[in-house]
Amino acid sequence: MTERILIRGGIVLTQDPDLGEIPNADVLIEDDKIVAIGKDLSAEGARIIDASGDIVIPGFVDTHRHTWETCIRTCAPDFALITYFGSILDKFARHYRPEDVHSATQWGALECINAGITTLVDWAHIMNTPEHADASVDALTESGIRSVFAYGFPNTSLVDWWFGPDYTGSVLTSVGDEARRVRSQYFSSDDGLVTMGLATRGPGFCKPEVVRHDWELAKELGVNITVHVAMDRFGYTKNQVLALRDMDLLYPGTTYVHASHFTEEEWELVRDSGGNVSLSHRSRSRWAMVGRRQPPHSNTECRSVSPRTWPPPHQQISSPRCMPSSDRSGDVCIRRHGRPTSTGWSRHPGFSPRVRLLRWPPSAVPKWQGSPIAPGRSPRGRRLTS
Ligand SMILES: [Zn+2]
């Protein structure tokens, strides 16, 4: 029997250029499809959801989140990137147990749903044991979110996994046999609510032979790659796409995360190779402001650009997440008061796979009270004068 749901009287932001934004409109869903959008729709026998005063929009897609870090969020609101590496990746991460990964991932995924993010790319670089991988997949599955489990690598040593013994690149490859096990055990089909990707490190972080191994592993597994690139102006993450080009490893469907310091040529290479980019404006602004504190909340998110294959080509959104910092997801801007209302609807063109009702109560948006740095004092230190 067909299940019918009518979302009545909402402000419908369809993201469909032909339909546009429709105030006081209805959305009719039959089973998992939106079959009509318009005013005063009749729907005999449908369950009615009163959306008056609410915004009805497609669910957002978070293209990059280290979901396992959810439970340590707010522990480092003023960390610079390098401090994050030293404290989180070199100290916290090695002590994570599978149950910690499970709790944090499930929490983070549920938090996404509650914030209107209905599709999540989980950059799971906490694969310290096989049980850690199992815990990640279980948590995503149990949460009910549509997600890409981007299988990462162990984070048991910063030197081993991010820099290498001589600080010119890690010599450790992703754990291929374990990735194959995860692929066959959980993702024999790509049609599920949770699918698989490969989260890996790339040139600069790894020796070239490690990069080649991991890219070939992704090809063998038939999954897309997600990789951090161009995070800083001068350092080891510069020119990584050029390096991948030189190694003939610009795979279509690769998600390049950050990309804040691409060269013009790299933007073109990503476009021409069928890659996509995950941007995070708030991480970018944070890293540009090392030494200054950031507002505890943001009511904006950021969009990815040039999506081609995965994540889906509309409503690309990536929350600032690389810092385990203050409330980075800005949940309040897109939350309906009260209960989460996400359900698995929609094959309507222009809609992402899920729709939820959203309300943005202005009173729920915290006001940033300004910089704690006293006037006249440089946050970068004291000027030495004779
Ligand atoms: Zn990241």
Image (tube, helix red, strand yellow):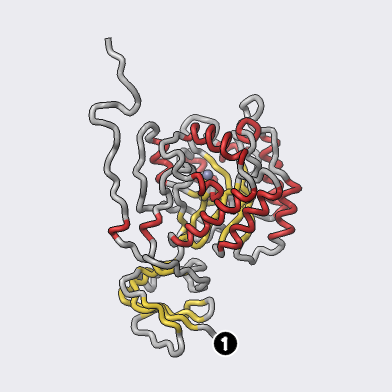
Disc tally is 1
Taking 149 as reference, is 10 above or below it? below
Looking at the picture, how far across and down is residue 344, in whole percent? 52, 71
- Please name whichever residue, 46 or 345, is drawn nearer the observer in this view of the structure: 46
Mark 1: which amino acid? Met
Could you say which quadrant of the image residue 138 lies in?
A: bottom right
Where residue 172 sits: x, y (%)? Answer: 69, 36
Q: Which residue is rendered at x = 62% and y = 30% of the image? A: 159
Ligand 1 closer than 8 Å to label 1 CB: no
Relative depth, front residue between 16 and 342: 342
- Residue 335 screen position, x and y as percent: 39, 62
Q: Is 315 situated left or right of 207 in this image?
A: left
Quarter of the view holding residue 89: top right
Residue ID at (59%, 57%): 148
Quadrant for the C terminus in the image: top left
Q: Residues within 10 Å of mark 1 (few under 14, many from 20)?
A: few
Q: Mark 1 highlights which residue?
A: 1
Instruction: Mark yes or no: residue 158 visible.
Output: yes
Residue nearest the observer in this picture, 32 or 337: 337
Label 1: which secondary element: loop
Residue 252 shows in the view:
no
Quadrant where the N terminus sits is: bottom right
